[in-house]
Amino acid sequence: MKKLPILSLLLVVVTGSIVSCSDVKREPSRNYMPDMWQSRAYETYAPHKNLEDSQIHYTNMPVSGTIKRGEIFPFPLKRDGVGDSSNYIGSKQIVNPLPMPDTLRLKESERLYLIHCGICHGTKLDGNGPLYKDGSGPYAAKPATLVGDAKYENMPEGQMFYSITYGKNLMGPYGSQLSTTQRWQIIHYIKSKQAKSVPKTDTAAPDSTATAAK
Amino acid sequence: MIQFRPIARVFLSFFLLLTVLSINKVSFAQDAAAGKVIFQGQCVQCHQVNRNATGPALAGIEERVPDKKLLYDWIRNNQKVLASGNPYFTNLYNEWNKTPMNVFSGLSDTDIDNILAYIKAEASKGDAAKGGAAGGGDGSKEQADKAQSSDNTLLFGILTLILAIIALILLQVNANLRKLSDDKEGVPAFEPVPFYRNKVYISLLTILLFVIGGYFTIQGAIGLGRNKDYQPEQPIYYSHKVHAGANQINCLYCHGGAEESKHANIPSVNTCMNCHMAINEYTGSAGKLYTESGQEVNGTAEIQKLYEYAGWDPAAKRYVNNGKPIEWVRIHNLPDHVYFNHSQHVKAGGVACQTCHGAIQEMGEVYQFTDLSMGWCVNCHRETKVKFTENKFYSIYEKFHEDIKNKGKDSSITVEAIGGTECQKCHY
């Protein structure tokens, strides 16, 4: 009987291949003609360490003071050092350079707020976003209550801008995620919401726009 | 009657004990409830019971500061205590980067006692939760389920094989029996041809091999350079299921480049640290984490890896060294001869991320959902209706605009109609 060893060998091979095959694809597929696949130019996120070897110094960062096309002038104040709060206090004097937005712009600002701020400060600006969830979310500290807390209702727009740009307490800096215009837009949105909730802050909001309109 | 007396006594004392205990419990609960209200109102901005926030975790505060009066003074006016030079609080103040605590002069002794009762209750709850997590009951069950399902395929395979062998043996037996009966009846037998020389068998096998081989060759050739289901291991186990799913973070929070540029950017480490300065442990908001091969992942350890990359010291709560970029493995690649622009699709086209990337909010590890082949692109361009309403980008298409005006929203204009399948749209 020669068949038995052949059959059993077949059985072992088949079961072995079924067991050893994982359906997780950890390696990419092969390419044909990779010269048309890979870019000869340096694409975004391509490794470029070899540039340094050929004496080309590529810094990844735009030249300091660069303003992108169509952007307004940047915030004039630098970030405070540790234990210093002079610029934070000084930022109170800076007014929102954007004119009071129309409904379409305000809608865009709301969209930006919901993407970047609402996650902590809540869709209703009550400091109860999905990350905090009355303390049951992963975020440990309660985020600031933007509507309904006198401290934030009376906060000058410039100081808000400072906090968004450089961060405050446990809030991180958003200067890299939002452009200068977008940050001012979001502040407009927050102020418009605050003005709706408590009439007494009405004096603060038109104040800043009056100076900005000049 | 006499023998019942001790039993009655035991009963009575037991009853008394129970009453005392329950009274104790009620008063304790009331304190904690009142304390919770004050805690949620005034303390929670900076403090948590079981973890550090802007200020230190408060669990076990009464063991650390046994002197009640000192604690009252500290909570009401911490600056005064600091000025008096108390060593414990001065150290604490320095440890926390001299972040000043607010002054709560309005709190009475009872208020503070209530808060402390609440902290004690919460702290013991936290301990219980930790003990429970160590047991890890349903996690192991899940794993067992997973193992079960993979075992099943093996079982079916073996069963099929056994059945095939039995069928073969039965065929042989059948042939032998027929030969025997033919011999008996005197029917002249053919010279038996072994099956490997049988022409019918050989030609059938050749055709079968040709079909199977051809199928796999063609599949392999089509699959060259395509990466559907590609799921590389990343330097950090980052779960989209936790972030985009359970915690509802918008895709554009991290990948804001998707609506502004060609690339949906990979977030830099500082974007991670926006939240992870405060969130330093994984509390299981999306259940236990598993890699695709079934190993359990410790979420808190993965956050520690992030801190290493960022150069962040979680104990001191500040950046201590320069950090280094995380080298994520890129999953979605297009050949150089294809131009693809995210902002065109996200901003002008209004396409949802999930259309091309799949249910990303349910992925523990991200895999490539579509094959990103040209046929797939062209097919979508043929079928997708252009969103003209409230879309400045397409305002130049006056002719189509009129069409919409006349026919209303049900215009039949596809992306192809406005040049979506022109070669140079993607190849130039």
Image (cartoon, rainbow, N blue to C red):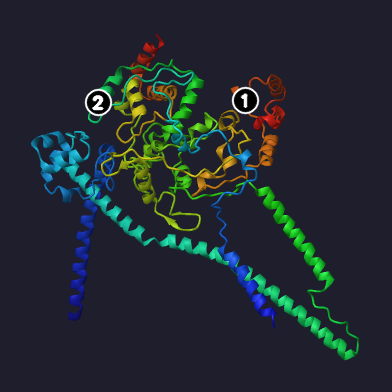
Is A155 located above or below residue B69 in the figure? above
Q: Is residue B414 visible?
A: no
In the picture, measured across the screen, residue B344 lies left or right of residue B320, that is right
Q: Position of residue B64 (x, y in %)?
A: 16, 49
Q: Position of residue A172 (x, y in %)?
A: 35, 34
**Kind of element beneath mark 1:** loop
Q: Residue at x 16, y 41 (%)?
A: B91
Eyeballing the image, is B129 above or below A129? Answer: below
Q: Nearer the viewer, mark 2 or mark 1?
A: 2
Q: Are marks 2 and 1 in contact (CB under 8 Å)?
A: no
Q: Which residue is mark 2?
A: A85
Identify the residue shown where x is 49% and y is 35%. Answer: B265
Q: Residues within 10 Å of mark 1 (few under 14, many from 20)?
A: few
The residue furthest bottom is B184
- Going by the image, does B163 lie left or right of B58? right
Give x and y (percent) for residue A7. 67, 75
As drawn, the residue found furthest toward the right would be: B187
Tell me the quarter of the image containing the N terminus of chain B: bottom left
Name the residue type under label 2. Ser
In this view, B286 is above or below B251: below
For mark 1, what is the residue? B389
| Chain label for disc 1 | B
Whether residue A166 is visible here, answered yes or no, is: yes
Residue A143 position by quadrant:
top left
